[in-house]
Image (cartoon, grey):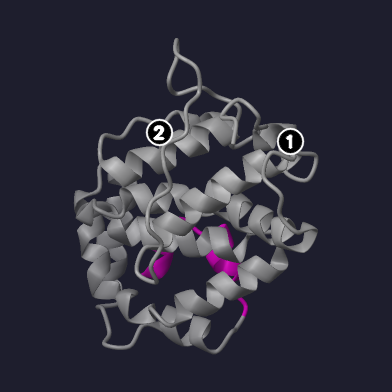
Amino acid sequence: MGHASFLPATEDPDCANFLADRRNTILACREHTRGDYRQMLELCAIILGDNPFKPAAVKFRPPIAITSARFMGRIIYYLTIHMFALTGEFEVEKEKLANIKKVNMFVLSSYLKSWYTAGKAASAPATDLRLLKDIVGYTHSPEVAEIASSVFKNLLWYLHRVCVGFAYFDEDISVEEKREMVARLQVSPPSKVSPWKETLAAGKNTSCLAEGRLPLVFL
C-alpha cells in the first residue's frame, strides 16, 4: 500500500465542514512523546491536513495490536483506514466506511482532548464534566452521541461533588470561579448522593449542563 496515496479528512466532504473550526485547536496539542499516544496524535494531525514530520514526507507506522482493552488501537486503525479509503488505496465497504467516519469525527472533535488530559488529577473534575458536556451537545451524529452518553452513565460513580475539590488545584479554572465554588459549598455542603448522577441516570434534561460553567455547575 503506497504511503503517499491518502487524503486527509479535510478533503472529505462528509467531514470537512465539521472539522474546520476544530482543526487549529487539535493541531496545537499534537506534541507527545509516548509511543502509541504519539502515533495517534500524528495520525490526527495527518487526517487534519497537517504534516507532523516536516520537512520530511508523511509516514505511517505499522499498525499496533487490537484488544478489547486498547481502544487507542482501534482509533489508530480507523484514522488510517479513513485516509487510504478516500483514494481507493484501501478498499472498504461503503457502510463500514460511513461508520468509521462517525467514530473518527467524534474522536477528533470531542474525545481527543479528554484522552490526553486524563492523567492530570487536578483537572479531572472539569475534564470529565467537559467530556460529558461535549457528548450531550454533540450534533454531528446523534447515534454516536446516544451510544457515548449511554456508556458514560455506567461510569457515573466517578461524578461526585466531593471530587470537585480537585478543581481547586486546576490551573485552568479562574480564581473567581474557585471562590464561587467555596461559597456554594458553604451554603450547600456536599451530599452523599449527586443530583447530577440522578438526573443523568434517569435520562432527564441536561441542557443546564451544556449551558453552565464547569465544574461550578456540579455544586
Give the x, y percent position of residue 95. Answer: 77, 63
- Camera sees residue 172: no
Residue 195 - label: none
Estimate the spatial distance between the alpha carbons at disc 2 and disc 1, rounded to whole Å.
27 Å
Q: In percent of the image, x 56 and y 52: which residue is there?
A: 78
x, y percentage for residue 213? Answer: 46, 55
Confirm whether residue 168 shows in the render: yes
Which of the 4 image quarters holds residue 191?
bottom left
Q: Secondary structure at mark 1?
A: loop
Q: Nearer the viewer, residue 3 or 154?
A: 3
Identify which residue, 25 or 173, lies in the foreground.
Answer: 25
| Label 2 CA crowd tier, 10 Å (few <14, some 14–19, many 20+) | few
Left or right of residue 2: residue 190: left
Above or below, 161 relative to 138: below
Residue drawn at x 50%, y 86% is 201
Task: Please identify the residue farthest to the top as the structure is shown.
Answer: 55
Q: Amino acid at mark 2?
A: Cys
Magenta-highlighted residues? 205-219
Q: Is residue 219 above or below residue 59?
A: below
Q: Say what amino acid the circle numbered 1 marks.
A: Thr
Figure quadrant of the N terminus: top right
In reply to whether residue 212 is colored magenta, the answer given is yes
Q: Quadrant of residue 37?
A: top left
Snapshot quadrant of residue 175? top left
Q: Nearer the viewer, residue 195 or 133?
A: 133
In this view, 92 is above or below 158: above
Q: Which residue is mark 2?
A: 29
Whole-percent x, y for residue 54 in the image: 45, 14
Tally the numbered discs.
2
Residue 87 located left or right of residue 182: right
Q: Nearer the viewer, mark 2 or mark 1?
A: 1
**Residue at which label 1 appears:** 87
